[in-house]
Image (cartoon, grey):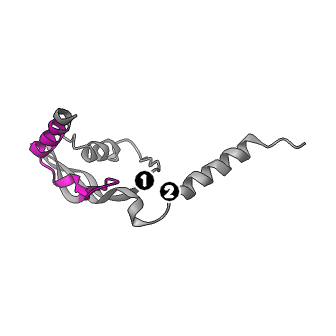
Amino acid sequence: MQQQDPLQKTSANASQVQGSVGNSADDIVLKVEDLEVTFFTEEGAVQAVRGISFEMKRGSILAIVGESGSGKSVTAYTILKLIQEPGRITGGKITFYPKNGKPIEISSLTERMICCSRYGAALSA
C-alpha cells in the first residue's frame, strides 16, 4: 500500500477550499474602490493612500503587503474607521456586503452613525 505525501494532500485541500468560494458578485464581502487618504498637517497635505482598489471574497483571506510607509496600516485603519485626524478619506469608497442585508458604504458613515450602531447592537443583545 502506497503512502500519500502530506504535501499533496494539503494542496488538494487548498484547491477544494478555493473552489468552494465561487466567483459570483454575491461572494464579495468587502470592496475598496479608488481609496485615497490624506493627512492635513501644518506643513501641508500628505497623501498616504493613492487610489487603492481591491475586492475580498467571502471565505477568503487577503494579505496586503508592501514596503514600509506604503500605506498598509493607513488602509486597514481606514477600513475599520479608526483613522484619526489629521487623516481623512479624500476619495473613493469602502463597501461592506453583509451576507443578508443591504450593502453598507463604510466610507460614508459618520462617527455618530457608528456609535449608535455599536451601542444599539450592544443594548439589544
Tell which residue pokes out farthest to the right in this image.
1
Q: Are marks 1 and 2 in contact (CB under 8 Å)?
A: yes
Q: In the image, what residue occupies the spot 22% across and 44% down? A: 81
Give the residue drawn at x 50%, y 56%.
21
Which residue range is magenta in the image? 93-120
Q: What residue is pinned by disc 2?
A: 21
Q: What amino acid does circle 2 point to?
A: Val
Above or below: residue 112 compared with residue 23: above
**Is 82 placed left or right of 25 in the picture?**
left
Q: Which residue is mark 1?
A: 58
- Density class for disc 2 (Cα within 10 Å; few <14, some 14-19, many ≥20) is some
Residue 70 percent location from the top left of the image: 35, 47
The extreme bottom residue here reads 24
Asked if residue 62 is positioned above or below residue 52 in the image, the reply reads above
Q: Residue at x 27, y 47 (%)?
A: 79
Q: Can you tell which quarter of the image residue 77 is in?
A: top left
Of 4 and 70, nearer the camera is 4
Residue found 67% across the figure and 44% down from its top:
10
Element marked by disc 2: helix
Q: Is residue 101 visible?
A: yes
How many numbered tags mark residues here? Answer: 2
116 left or right of 36?
left
Q: Quadrant of the C terminus?
A: top left
